[in-house]
Amino acid sequence: MDSYIIGQQLLNGLTLGSIYGLIAIGYTMVYGIIGMINFAHGDIYMISAYLTAIILAVIFSFGVTSLPFALLVTLLLTMVITGVYGWAIERVAYRPLRGSTRLAPLISAIGMSLVLQNYVQVSQGARNQGIPILIDGVVRLGGEEQFVQITHIQILIVLASFIGMGVLTYIIQKTSLGRQCRATQQDQKMAAILGINTNRIISTVFVIGSAMAALAGVLVTLNYGSFDFYIGFIIGIKAFTAAVLGGIGSLPGAMLGGIVLGMSEGLFAGFVSADYKDVFAFSLLVLVLIFRPSGLLGKPEIEKV
Amino acid sequence: MTTETETPLLAVRNLSMRFGGILALNNINFDIKQGSISAMIGPNGAGKTTVFNCITGFYQATSGSIYYQDGDSTINLVQVLGEKLHFKYVLNPRQLASRLYYKMFGGSHLVAQAGVARTFQNIRLFREMTAIENLLVAQHMQIVRNPISGVFKTPAFRRSEQAAIDRAHTWLEVVGLEDDANRLAGELPYGHQRRLEIARAMSTGPKMICLDEPAAGLNPKETEELSNLIRLLRDQHHVTVLLIEHDMGMVMDVSESIVVLDHGEVIAEGTPHEIENNTAVLAAYLGEDYSTTVAAPDGTGAEGNPQETNNS
Amino acid sequence: MSLQQKISLRKALIDGFWSGLLALVIFGPISGLVLQGYEVRNELIRPLLMALLVGGGRFLVSCFAQSEKGKRYVDGLAGKRGAGVTVASLKKGKYQYLVIPVLILAGLCLPFVLGKYWLTVVILALIYVLLGLGLNIVVGLAGMLDLGYVAFYAVGAYTLAMGAQYFHLGFWTLLPIAGIGAALFGALLGFPVLRMHGDYLAIVTLGFGEIIRLVLNNLLDITGGPNGASAPPPTLFGLEFTRRAKQGGIPFHEYFHISYSPTYKYIFIYLVLFTIVCLMILFVTRLKQMPMGRAWEALREDEIACRSLGINHVTVKLSAFMMGAMVGGTAGMFFATYQGFINPSSFTFFESALILAIVVLGGLGSTVGVIIAALVLTILPEVLRDFAEYRVLMFGIAMVLMMVWKPRGLIRIKRRAFNAKGVTS
Ligand SMILES: Nc1ncnc2c1ncn2[C@@H]1O[C@H](COP(=O)(O)OP(=O)(O)OP(=O)(O)O)[C@@H](O)[C@H]1O
Ligand SMILES: [Mg+2]
């Protein structure tokens, strides 16, 4: 009997974990390339949830009936606009700080996070917002009494995450742009000397990270249907946990960390206490940082003296 | 001349350091005599700074030991950094306890407290503090630092603070920076910063000081002064000096023994005269083609070809 | 006017156009289309105005940045040039001995001239001064970014509430317990995380601040969860400031045969708090001249160099962290007693961000700066009540601008000068 419950929790964990993984990409890439924690990243995700609802509402108001078409357009537009957000934030709040004190970008990022939250709160109102359920339907595995239930949207989330991840891996590994990203990550000065426009690459990384967060935002919004201006905070910390767990700087690590975190959180919520699942996630972050700061897939790094 | 039987201040044994795929140090062995001025030389990337970092506890050596003579007892500087905990130590509670202790409280500061001070290849001063404050921070472990007596400015605290300030002034005088006492360290000219860093290291009251390329970026006159300063530190302040330097003139001038590193291995060890004539060293510096004659098998104390010695 | 000729209007126009366009994309959907149920309301005029503003602003900035003066100015941003730290001259300021007693006297008289409303505002402001001074030790002096400072604030506040509720202890007994308790709490959290790479500390403390709130919220049986708990007001040698004695003493007004007024309580809290803030300022000033404070600042400058000097970076950081926690706990205690009632919603991340904003705007390390920033940031919103909605937005923007414009704060930090050898100061 328990095995079904475990299965169900693992499955829910996998879905949630894919989302964490998608958001973690933004953290891990930015950290890898400029060594800062982009505290505003969770709020970028929050913005994308709002964009999803707004764009869907606009599309439907034009009388569009084809759901796949509406979803595709929403996804593309949300990713693009969120990408612009990422670009602009980097340009305005982080780039002028290169070569400033160590704390400056972190504080600026916290400021940016406050700005985004309050901007959305002021323009959209503080109350919960939502979209109607667009995709329903479930698949049941198992018998009459005991079964594991998979919703269609869960399948969509996992598939879309893996496709997004695959495309990104291809870009980073195989294209010239990806090579430039990796070179900049390894040694920014050297990359600049070799003629790579590192500023442009850093911007690109912010755009990619934001677009991935937008993918997560669209998927989660379709799944839960409800959001407010504060959702980016907790999920942001958790996604960062996922990035650290997987090994900060590592793309597959972000996805792996997300899934491991999602699943263990699911199990914890199912068997220990749902109230304390966030506490569990944070404790995991601390434990990982103490005992394995390089994460699951990261390489241990020795600080150069 | 010190006798051969005297225990060395520092004995590096089979030291290896690996960074991922790079074997930066491979089974290094050398000794540093008490009260000597020694130099470590080698081409760029040979691993000299890495040796320093292992000695001063900034890198945890992959294997090997560094024995340091602290009074009558010998400390293994690798141990105090906190070695890996293994299951096998569960059976040996004392070992486990000591390892656990060092894992929690150990670190490079213990090496410094044992009396090994250092400077850095890229100057690391507290740039936004004044020169004298830099030296006061260096005396942190020697002065009254109990917060209660500090808040109430007890007589003991005042005395200790005044003594620290006086010591700081003395060191500033030694390195010739009296006029810069109240200037921000980051705003000092480069040569002054180098000297301030040495003064700061000396303010910790060390037995041994490791200087990483102290003459880098100095002009010939400043280098000359630096050589004198180094001799003065040894002669009047009785510290053992180990320096890394690329300026061969200065190395040959100031040092009594030299360790030559190449590709993470000690290729020669000896007096300046011996090193000057060592073919393996010449080969390492000038390329393989240069060594027409075979280098001495163990690389130490080799007599090179007399014709090749006129470059130093 | 050769300067004028160098400015290319075309470039500025292009810059302005693109910025405006991007601003339109950014602001368009979120502020232009407001969700109402499953529909959107058209407010597109707002993003249009904003885009015009951004485009026009960028145009002007672009013009300015092309001039010689502008170029120099842009180069100087973000502390790329002068660091903003100077060394004080050896001569002591003459006014110091006059200004400080006058300020203290004024501070002591203040509660007797203010009405109850402004008195509560000023008490809150002083609580934030205390919080700012505490966090300044951690962030400004020791250079560790603590984003969960509110956790210690909460520990202090709940120590008072829980201690009174379960152990029937009074304010004065709990005051040291709250401080020490918060400090121990800080040690417990700090010891494992302080050896980590600096930026990780930020996120761990961020998570920790959130954990505390969640735990307080979920421990319904003990803390009362979201319903909160009540906290007792302080007593004056057994005299109570409530209408009727609740803690086994005599009410203040009955003892002195005057009529009851709730203002007495606030005046008393104010005076106690004011004394503590003054002591705290003295303490922080002394700290900076002590080995401990110097070690904190040195650690902020260069941790590796500190280790090479035999300073144990973990214990030094821990001391700063605990000191900050202690101050935070004390401030929390005053917050609880001043409100008389607390619940977890007072201890959200926003609170941590506000305290951080105080420290940042005050200039990371400058005591005077932090005090001014705390007073301004708490009193200004009271004055500008109409813009309450935009408060957080303004804080956020101020933090970003501050980092770009003057990362060292508005007030220049002056370092202490030392006498020449042999001259005792
Ligand atoms: N923290 C580190 N991580 C990875 N590799 C490192 C690290 N520190 C040193 N190395 C590598 O170890 C090798 C030796 O470096 P080291 O700095 O010791 O050389 P060096 O002899 O001091 O050279 P130089 O004369 O240029 O200062 C180099 O290949 C360097 O890249
Ligand atoms: Mg080196």
Image (cartoon, coloured by chain):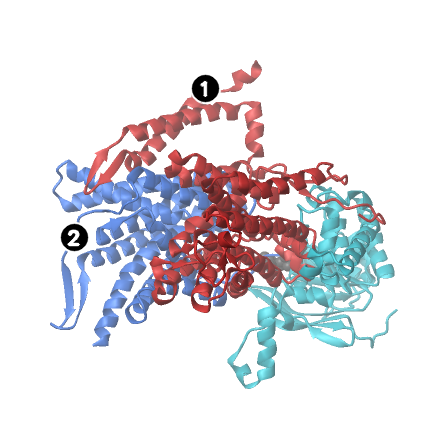
Chain colours: A blue, B cyan, C red
Mark 1: few, some, or many residues within 10 Å (few <14, many ≥20)? some
Q: Which residue is mark 2?
A: A135
Measured in 3D between alpha carbons, the distance from the residue under mark 1 to the one under mark 2, in whole angstroms, is: 52 Å
Furthest residue in direction bottom, as rendered: B91
Q: Is residue B304 left or right of residue C296?
A: right
Q: Is residue A79 left or right of residue C354?
A: left
| Amino acid residing under circle 2 | Ile
Q: Quadrant of residue A124?
A: top left
Q: Quadrant of residue C77?
A: top right
Specify the quarter for ligand 1: bottom right
Q: Toward the viewer: B95 or A80?
A: B95
Q: Circle 1 sits on which residue? A: C9
Residue drawn at the location 54% of the way across and 31% of the way down = C74
Measured from the top left, where is residue B224 in percent x and y? 83, 49
Label 1 amino acid? Leu
C92 sits to left or right of A84: right
Identify which residue, C291 or B253, lies in the foreground: C291
Would residue C356 be seen by someone viewing this image from the given angle? Answer: no
Q: Position of residue A90 (x, y in %)?
A: 43, 41
Q: Say above or below: B72 vs A33.
A: below
- x and y percent of residue B290 in the render? 71, 57
Task: Give left or right: position of A152 versus C123.
Answer: left
* Parent chain of label 1: C
Name the quadrant of the C terminus of chain B: bottom right
Q: Secondary structure at mark 1?
A: helix
Q: Chain of mark 2?
A: A
